[in-house]
Structure formats: C-alpha cells, structure tokens
Image: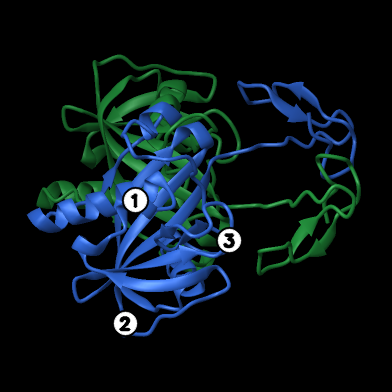
Chain colours: A green, B blue
Amino acid sequence: MPFCLKCSTAMELRIPEYDDRLRPVCPVCGHVHYTNPRMVVGCIPEWHGSVLLCRRDIEPRLGYWTLPAGYLENGESPLEGAVRETREESLARVVAVEPFRMYPLVFIDQIYMMFRSRMEDAGFGTTPESSEVRLFGEAEIPWGEIAFPVVRETLEDFFACRRTGDFRFEVKEFRTREAFFREPGREAGTGA
Amino acid sequence: MPFCLKCSTAMELRIPEYDDRLRPVCPVCGHVHYTNPRMVVGCIPEWHGSVLLCRRDIEPRLGYWTLPAGYLENGESPLEGAVRETREESLARVVAVEPFRMYPLVFIDQIYMMFRSRMEDAGFGTTPESSEVRLFGEAEIPWGEIAFPVVRETLEDFFACRRTGDFRFEVKEFRTREAFFREPGREAGTGA
C-alpha cells in the first residue's frame, strides 16, 4: 500500500465515494491514488519503401532492433508523442502521420498506438538511445533480432497491409502474456 | 512536489537516469513519480437508428445528458472499458463495438476513445450514476443539455458519418481549452 503523495500518510484500501472499487485512500487528507493504463506511442518511419529501425543502446533488450516508440507524456497528443519519440531515437523527422494500429497489452497495463509516417527527408542518425539507425527493405528486416513482440506485430501487420493496400486502423488486444507470446520465436521483453 | 509513495520522503525535482526531463524523484529510495495522460473510454449505444443517452445523477454536470464513458481501468482493454462503462451507467449490453473517434484533450491530459456499438436488446435503465436513460432519434437530441463538449463532438461526428456512410476511425486533437470551446453554445465542463 503506498504512502500519500500529498501528505505522506500511510494509505488505506477503501472504496472512495462515488466509486465502486477498492483504491488506496489517504485517511488524513482524502487523496485517492488512481493508477491507469499508460499509452506508448510510436512510428513506422517510411522512406521510399523501406522502414527505419533503431538498434537499442539502452536496456531492456540492448542491441535489439525496434521501431521508435515510448511513453506518451502529459502535454502532448499521441501523434505528437510518436513524432517526438521518432526524433529522439532516430533523429528522423516524420510527416503524414496516420494512426495504424492500437495494441492494448492488458497484462501489463500498456496501450501501444503505432502510427504510419513518411520521413520528411533522408536524414537520420544515432542517438543516446540508439547505437545504430538503418533503413530496411521488407526482405532485410532482422526478424530474429527484434526487441519486442509488439514491434514484430506492427511490422508484420504493416507489410501484410502493404500487400493489400488496406491500411485501415485496427485495434488488436492482447489480454494475456500467453496470447502475446503464443508464437514460436517470440522472446521475453515488452516495454517502451 | 509530492511525497514518495514508496517511502514517504519528500521528493525532489530531478532528471532521472536515462531520461530527459524533470520528474519528482525520491532522494532516499530513488522512486520516480511519472504522470501520464489518462484514457477515457465510452460508447455510442445504437438501437434501431436511435442512440442511448444518460442523464447524469452525479457531479460534474448533474442533470445534463451524456454518452456512457469513464476512465479506463488497469486490467481492461479500451473496448472492455467502454462496454463496462455502458453497462454501469445505462444497464445496456452492447455488441459489435468498433473504434470510432479518438479525441486527445491535451490541455487536461485526457484521451477520449469513443466506440460505436449496437445494443444487444432493448434493455436499459437508470443506475446510481444516471437518473434517466433514454433513446433519442437524431432530431430529438437535447443539444442544449449535453454534459460535455466531447460528447457533443462525438454525437455531431456520428450523425455526420451516418449521412455519408463513412465511419472510418479518426483522431481529432484539441490542444487548447480555447480550441475545444471555440463554438458558441459550448459550456464549461469536461471529464469522465
């Protein structure tokens, strides 16, 4: 049970007024500690048929390849967050940013929202988070070295949609860790 | 500055390791207090061309009409949350739930995600949160008594889409309070 972040008192588990579930409530100041799912936002940066991947220079999954993505911050929209993360992790500037997939990962209270995007120019480069940044054609994707299952899922969905030309937005839920890691070859590790 | 919810120490504003912005950090146990935007999820429950609205029996905006919606909880997907809120606020059971609009309200760090849905049967009724629950045809919508601008926006978008038959998912961002309340007749009050 957490301490109250407003007044530092030890909190109690109670059902707050006008609520219907147990929450940590401060017996002194009445503050309720809510915890809610977090959004992770990211991009598929496209450049003339190739997509930009970043080799992680930070844990977890250091050395593995990922799409630029990270936690949505207060004060920004999901689209703005996806553009910011892309710039921070790859130096690439993206435009024509369109919602592509939402992947609620219910078992870890994360909601990934991945956008398609076009790189504004050929500029990109390494960053404190990425030891290598590279464009990959579909046949070159390093499937065995992808950092997180949700990145693999995004890339698979993207290339499948590219074959049909139908990039309609879809929500694909993963309620359990087992459902998420159902496919052979998927390895541990999710996160921003 | 908040107290540490893990150890109750007064926190300090610092840039955590591997981060790039100031956050409340505990100088004793190292806990970082992140705050992130919250998702609000809700439904447009449809029944033979009419939509189900709830008259709020709770503050804020008591007595005004709303679509069923509320904060997404840990352990559920946005779709599940929208179905749950619909049941809690109107007793209606909905099926064929499809993502319709996302409205990031950047100025209050909320992200509304509204789903279209079909009521499974004609059942609905009042609840602790709703003093009245009623089906409305488009011509009957009480536009002057809608609880929140985002509900008005959802209903306007829904009826506009119904005229064209194109219900494609869209994200409509509202970065500022001013942009959100730009239309005459819009009154104060947003929230779940």
Q: CA distance from mark 1 to mark 3?
A: 19 Å
Amino acid bearing label 2? Glu
Q: Quadrant of the N terminus of chain B?
A: top right
Q: Earlier in the sequence, mark 1 or mark 2?
A: 2
Chain at numbered mark 3: B
What element does badge 1 sit on?
Answer: helix
Asked if A79 appears above or below A166 in the picture, the reply is above
Reading the image, the residue beneath label 1 is B144
Determine crowd level at label 2: few under 14, some 14-19, many 20+ residues with C-alpha closer than 10 A: some
Chain at numbered mark 2: B
What element does badge 2 sit on?
Answer: loop
Reading the image, the residue beneath label 3 is B58
Q: Position of residue A107 (x, y in %)?
A: 56, 62
Instruction: Indicate which disc residue B120 carries.
Output: 2
What element does badge 3 sit on?
Answer: loop
Q: Nearer the viewer, mark 3 or mark 2?
A: 3
Q: Earlier in the sequence, mark 3 or mark 2?
A: 3
Q: Earlier in the sequence, mark 1 or mark 3?
A: 3
Q: Position of residue A87 (x, y in %)?
A: 41, 21
Work out whether residue B32 or residue B51 is closer to the camera in this orientation and state it. B51
Mark 1 vs 3: CB contact within 8 A = no
Amino acid bearing label 1? Gly
